Image (cartoon, helix red, strand yellow):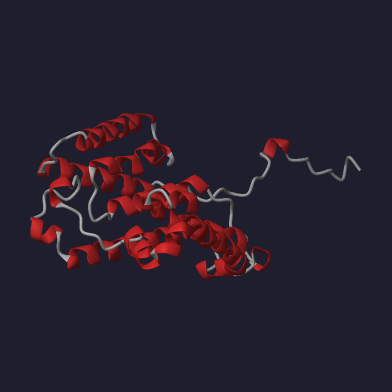
Amino acid sequence: LSLAVSVKMNILLFAPGLLFLLLQQFGLLGCIPKLFICALLQVVLGLPFLLVNPVGYLTRSFDLGRQFQFKWTVNWRFLPEEVFLNRAFHTTLLLAHLAGLGLFALHRWHRSKESILALLKDPAERKDPSPPLTIIFVLFSSNFLGVCCSRSLHYQFYVWYFHTLPYLLWCTPTAKLAHMPKVLLLGVIELCWNTYPSTICSSLSLHICHGLILLQLWYGTAPLPALHTPPPSRRPAAVSKKAQ
């Protein structure tokens, strides 16, 4: 992840999911050294620039507040330009992103009966060990939430998540008749991204498709796997008193 951040900042959308997985696997104290390695790698990669112009490097390389141009937006074309450029709108999207991450962390990623604060403990000290998590589900859904709440999506940003869409659509239990709507959903998303320039219809359609995927991830998440017990036919029969 840290290596990828040095190439493109959008990989940070995976960071909340990765942090959750690290806490789940190692606890808070065990997670800190891993985060230190990520930070150290950024320092090493940026050292040639930090030695020459540290302020310029930090402010320009990690400029999270830069303004996007309305003419390139794929997802917010239906909004007036003044709303698109408004900082209050950006803050609202950030709050929605944080709320979505919090809800998924509490109710879809954290599948243990213990409080989510148990993730801060050492895994060996947890009363109720967390069941195995699908790492891909946590990472891909974390990235997808960020895409849905992005201030702007430009055409090249499609590479952020197009490869995750088949998994996100088919990772939940699906009836046979539901496969075709999912294929149609992929087609509509592809059409939205290939409409240039973007239109009100293409932008709204993209949000509707994203919303449907989010609803499926929320309501279609598979229940916790039950403890495996052998079927009744294979259980050893009790020895009767007559046999004794």
* Quarter that holds the C terminus: top right
> Where residue 150 appears, x then y in whole percent?
27, 54
Image height check: is 17 above or below 134? Answer: below
Q: Is residue 74 visible?
A: yes
> Is 208 left, or right, of 216 in this rendering?
left
Find residue 33 and report its image quarter: bottom right
Q: Is residue 218 visible?
A: no
Identity of the residue drawn at 17% across and 46% down: 72
> Where residue 238 appears, x then y in whole percent?
80, 44
Identity of the residue drawn at 39% across and 34% down: 175
> Is 231 left, or right, of 173 in this rendering?
right
> Where residue 208 appears, x then y in whole percent?
22, 45
> Where residue 42 appears, x then y in whole percent?
48, 58
Find residue 40 and report its image quarter: bottom right
> Is 137 left, or right, of 132 in this rendering?
left
* Frontmost residue, 136 versus 227: 136
Identity of the residue drawn at 24% across and 41% down: 155
